[in-house]
Image (cartoon, rainbow, N blue to C red):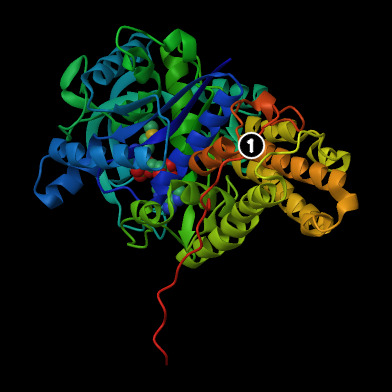
């Protein structure tokens, strides 16, 4: 089955921070999991380089928008690589191939009678690149997201007849309750639609930095129309000489943050309908990573630098932390202290330690050979249906839920090993068989858990699976008892070394 997952394309007006890494990590976890299931996956991310957000930032820095784009696109690309994202393509809206598709689709929308010239007058946020209605304005003239004073704009431009799509959108929502998830965002988008839709600008007259309107090159296409089309255009040129559109369109899931819901859940499907293109299967909306009570953002200056965390603790720890600490789909706070706590208690102690003590016991009690006996039934029972439940969670894009399913097994196995106390069994000659079974069960548990954890922590799980000789990492192999006899175990460096503290000077 095709599985096409996307992240928003990131504005190149500033350097990336953890909030951007977040969506890319979640999308990568989905992509890796679906590949384990043998699905035909395409994973897209990239940068949004046109419009006011970039133009104004470039002006402030005294560089051209293109220069700023070139400088920061590299950083976003680097971030994707550093978090371990297995992207199939990195799109930039300055790619000429993208511009061609944008013009073609906009021309189709015009040919189908959904465009007219008009005058826009109203509030505009240059940071959101969004025309705000009165109900979307805070304190009379402020952007509720960026907290800045809005501009009052008056401009002749072309309009897209969004209002005529009210009914088709209501029908879409009625027929496909999974079109927008979680439910709270579905309700939010639907009530926005039901309030009545205003037509939206499709072009900008004052801006020069963008894709020219095909029938009026004096104007550029509104940056959101341009940006949204990346999901569609990328498929036509991501792989030279191959058009992947028929294979992957409609997209399976667009992952987005809650601030860009209206664009993805209302304008985007309407645009596609207007152009006669199938709408995506679903949009999944995650919350914000907060620092304290506030959204982490470059303009507020309260950001965690993902590059730094990765440098110190590795990409796996960061990937784990953001998806474990904050339920995917809701807002949640992150902090350096929170990170250290999760790292120590869960990664180093619960998972890392289970791995190292298991391998150490196989080494000490059985000379490094995993006993070739059936693991105990009580342990097998604990794993019953686990892989299926994890798959179900992923089908719902419940990334944190999937991780929790797996983590509960880790805790259970830790409890089990305490109860079984193999170090006691080793002292008793009459318990040889039980010790064999316990060790075999522990290795098998680690194997299943680590295969399921692979999408979250590819590097650490790979090391462990390699150490126990488990080659098959497909979802079929993630069933208890399905593994090949692993034979000998190889030595393993700690998966998550403890955080060493500089000794504090005495008070
Ligand atoms: N360029 C547009 C998206 C166009 S998609 C066709 C844009 N870019 S952005 O760089 O401002 O934001 C990109 C994504 O990062 C958004 O989904 C936004 O929600 C997300 N995040 C930015 N800061 C965030 C947090 N602090 N927490 C979680 N996600 C956040 O909007």
The percent coordinates of residue 358 (x first, y second) are 67, 50
Q: Name the foreground residue: 321 vs 113.
A: 321
Residue 108 is left or right of residue 339, and the answer is left
The percent coordinates of residue 489 (x first, y second) are 61, 40
Q: Return the residue found at the far bottom.
A: 507
Residue 290 is left or right of residue 430, and the answer is left
Rendered-image quarter of ligand 1: top left
Tell me, yes or no, if residue 197 can be seen here. no
Residue at the spot x=35%, y=20% of the render? Answer: 234
Q: In this view, does 491 lie above or below 203?
A: below
Q: Mark 1 points at which residue?
A: 488
Q: Return the residue found at the far right.
A: 430
Q: Is residue 138 above or below residue 487?
A: below
Residue at the spot x=52%, y=34% of the render? Answer: 196
Q: Is residue 54 above or below residue 413?
A: above
The quarter of the displayed image where residue 185 is located: top right
Q: Name the foreground residue: 381 vs 370.
A: 370
Q: What element carries label 1?
A: loop
Q: Name the foreground residue: 221 vs 70.
A: 70
């Amino acid at each position: 089955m095709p599985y096409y997952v996307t992240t928003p394309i990131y504005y190149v007006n500033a350097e990336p921070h953890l909030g951007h890494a977040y969506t890319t990590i979640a999308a990568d976890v989905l992509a890796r999991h679906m590949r384990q299931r043998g699905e035909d996956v395409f994973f897209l991310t990239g940068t949004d380089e046109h419009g006011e957000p970039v133009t104004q930032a470039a002006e402030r820095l005294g560089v051209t928008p293109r220069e700023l784009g070139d400088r920061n696109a590299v950083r976003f690309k680097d971030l994707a690589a550093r978090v371990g994202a297995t992207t199939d393509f990195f799109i930039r809206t300055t790619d000429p191939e993208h511009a061609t598709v944008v013009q073609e689709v906009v021309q189709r929308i015009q040919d189908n009678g959904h465009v007219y010239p008009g005058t826009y007058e109203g509030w505009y946020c240059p940071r959101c690149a969004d025309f705000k209605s009165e109900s979307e304005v805070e304190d009379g003239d402020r952007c509720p997201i960026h907290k800045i004073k809005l501009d009052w704009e008056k401009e002749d431009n072309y309009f897209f007849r969004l209002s005529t799509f009210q009914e088709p959108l209501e029908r879409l929502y009625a027929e496909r309750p999974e079109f927008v998830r979680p439910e709270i965002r579905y309700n939010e988008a639907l009530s926005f639609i039901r309030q009545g839709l205003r037509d939206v600008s499709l072009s900008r007259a004052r801006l020069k930095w963008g894709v020219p309107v095909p029938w009026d090159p004096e104007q550029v296409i509104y940056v959101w129309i341009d940006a949204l089309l990346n999901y569609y255009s990328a498929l036509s040129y991501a792989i030279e000489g191959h058009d992947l559109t028929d294979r992957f369109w409609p997209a399976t899931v667009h992952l987005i943050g809650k601030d860009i819901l209206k664009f993805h859940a209302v304008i985007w499907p309407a645009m596609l309908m207007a152009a006669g293109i199938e709408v995506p299967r679903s949009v999944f909306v995650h919350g914000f990573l907060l620092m304290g009570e506030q959204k982490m953002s470059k303009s507020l200056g309260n950001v965690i630098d993902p590059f730094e965390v990765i440098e110190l603790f590795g990409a796996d720890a960061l990937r784990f932390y953001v998806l474990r600490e904050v339920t995917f789909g809701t807002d949640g706070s992150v902090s350096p202290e929170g990170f250290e706590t999760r790292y120590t208690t869960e990664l180093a102690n619960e998972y890392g330690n289970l791995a190292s003590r298991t391998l150490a016991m196989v080494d000490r009690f059985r000379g490094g050979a995993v006993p070739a006996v059936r693991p105990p039934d009580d342990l097998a029972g604990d794993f019953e249906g686990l892989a299926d439940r994890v798959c179900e969670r992923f089908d719902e894009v419940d990334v944190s839920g999937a991780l929790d399913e797996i983590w509960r097994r880790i805790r259970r196995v830790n409890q089990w090993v305490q109860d079984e106390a193999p170090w006691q069994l080793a002292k008793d000659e009459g318990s040889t068989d039980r010790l064999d079974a316990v060790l075999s069960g522990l290795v098998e548990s680690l194997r299943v858990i680590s295969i399921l954890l692979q999408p979250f922590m590819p590097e650490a799980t790979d090391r462990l699976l390699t150490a126990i000789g488990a080659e098959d990492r497909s979802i079929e192999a993630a069933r208890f008892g399905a593994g090949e006899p692993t034979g000998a175990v190889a030595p393993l460096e700690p998966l998550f070394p403890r955080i060493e503290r500089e000794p504090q000077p005495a008070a």
